[in-house]
Amino acid sequence: MQPGACSVADELGFPTETIPDADALFMRAHRMHFCGDVLKPGVFRNQQGSMSVNWNKYASAQATKQQATKNPDMNAVISLIAGGIRKIDKLDVQHTPDPDNRAHSEVVLPINEQDLTEVRVLLLRLAIVVIPLAGQQS
């Protein structure tokens, strides 16, 4: 690169990195995705083309909870291990930082309903609630 030239990563503010298989990803789970204390598989869904998660290298579970735009206390936080996600056929984890969130990462879920149902069940088996909803036990 020539002196003074900017890369795409410079323009974004943060470089894209490879997330190691052993690292955790945090995701908010709104109370509507629980039946009592039990997480429902519908929590795993595409929003604007992918499922948004935070890489634990740059965000804590508590910081992830506080990113809820309206009421953080209406959200639990779950953790998924990147390598476990990658073991699910056709899933991958990509670090996609944005200027406001260096931890931002994405998992692209299947569009086909039958495949999505299967993936949701597999992701549910990997998920660990690390910050329960207010009033719940972990």
Image (tube, rainbow, N blue to C red):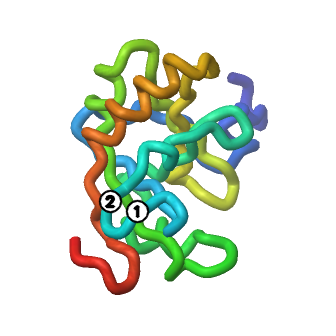
Kindly identify the residue that appears in the image at 73 percent across and 39 percent down. 48
- Image side of residue 76 versus residue 102, left or right: left
Q: From what the image shows, is residue 49 above or below residue 28?
A: above
Query: Which residue is nearer to you in this view: 100 or 74?
Result: 74
Give coordinates of residue 44: x percent, y percent: 50, 42
Q: Which amino acid does label 1 sit on?
A: Cys
Residue matched to label 1: 35
Residue 98, given in percent of the width and then of the height, sits at: 66, 49
> At x 47% / y 35%, what residue is drawn?
17
Q: How far apart are marks 1 and 2 (CA)?
A: 5 Å
Query: Is 109 rendered above or below residue 69?
Result: above
Q: In which quarter of the image is the N terminus?
A: top right
**Which residue, as the protein is rendered here, is positioned at the far bottom?**
135
Q: Residue 111: give x, y in percent of width and height.
A: 63, 21
- The numbered dot on residue 15 is none
113 displayed left or right of 33: right
**What is the x, y in percent for residue 29?**
48, 60
Is 2 left or right of 118, judged from the image as shown? right
Mark 1 lies on a secondary structure that is strand
Identified by mark 2, the residue type is Val
Q: Do the residues labelled 1 and 2 touch (CB within 8 Å)?
A: yes
User: For the image shown, how many numbered marks are present on the structure?
Assistant: 2
Rendering quarter of residue 62: bottom left
* Camera-nearest residue between 47 and 122: 122
Q: Name the residue under label 2.
A: 38
The residue carrying pointer 1 sits among few (fewer than 14), some (14 to 19) or many (20 or more) residues within 10 Å by Cα, namely few
